[in-house]
Image: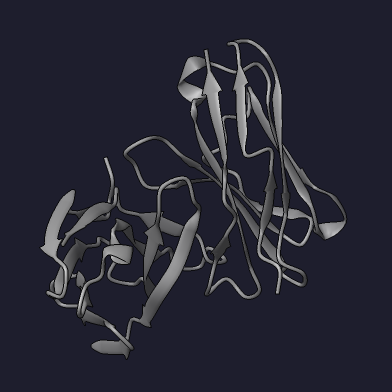
Amino acid sequence: EAGVAQSPRYKIIEKRQSVAFWCNPISGHATLYWYQQILGQGPKLLIQFQNNGVVDDSQLPKDRFSAERLKGVDSTLKIQPAKLEDSAVYLCASSPSGTEQFFGPGTRLTVL
Amino acid sequence: GEDVEQSLFLSVREGDSSVINCTYTDSSSTYLYWYKQEPGAGLQLLTYIFSNMDMKQDQRLTVLLNKKDKHLSLRIADTQTGDSAIYFCAESIPDSWGKLQFGAGTQVVVTP
């Protein structure tokens, strides 16, 4: 069974630029999560989708971050404009039921 | 700061047992998890325990849960160099479709 796919794996941008990340969850998984992991910290949930609807975006900085999940499958996370403090690894995870979450390899973002 | 607390570092000799400890905050958490993260990789689900259990064993891994003290531990028997990684404890947030609260992680270094 293929795992959670993410791209790109690495991205370097300058502050105030825009960036987008893509996630393809495990087939059949209804729930999709985006996490932000700052160096030295545990992952922090940004947004959670159930099929193509948002169930929790309380920690998403909505002035600059946006996310969508089209047709309840793939998802994109966008940052516009980026700030220095957005430098982190962005992890996507999916779950069939909410009990077990399976993570992708992440996208490492560096904002200069 | 993190609601889930872990010690930051553990050094262990190859062949010995490792014990990683975690304290969590929400006594109504349904599931408690251990994830492993190797350098440059996403999080790998190692094991999880349902809150009405005291212990779960899975090959070299033993999870102990003390609900009274809100304490979770992961024991790795016969620790190998491949076990060197960061280990994250996480608790499920009740009624949240699987939202997880992670600790900051414990870096385990296995020496020959």
How many marks can you see?
A: 0
Q: Quadrant of residue A71?
A: bottom right
Left or right: B16 as drawn, with respect to B4: left
Is B50 on the left or on the right of A35, as rendered?
Answer: left
Residue A58, horizontal then vertical, whole percent = 54, 42
Q: Quadrant of the C terminus of chain B?
A: bottom left
Residue visible at 71% across and 60% down in the picture? A25
- Residue B3 x %, y %: 27, 51
Q: Nearer the viewer, residue A7 or A23?
A: A7
Judge from the rendering whether residue B7 lies leftward or rightward of residue B44; answer left or right.
left
Closer-to-camera residue (B15/B56) = B15
What colour scheme was applied to this rendering of the protein? one colour
> Can residue B66 be seen by looking at this rendering?
no
Could you say which is closer to the camera, residue B58 or residue B38?
B38
Say if A109 sits above or below B88 in the image: above
Identify the image quadrant of the N terminus of chain B. Answer: top left
Who's the residue at 36% across and 62% down the image? B90
Asked if residue A31 shows in the view, the reply is yes
Say whether residue B65 is left or right of residue A42. Answer: left
In the picture shown, does residue A57 fall above or below B63? above
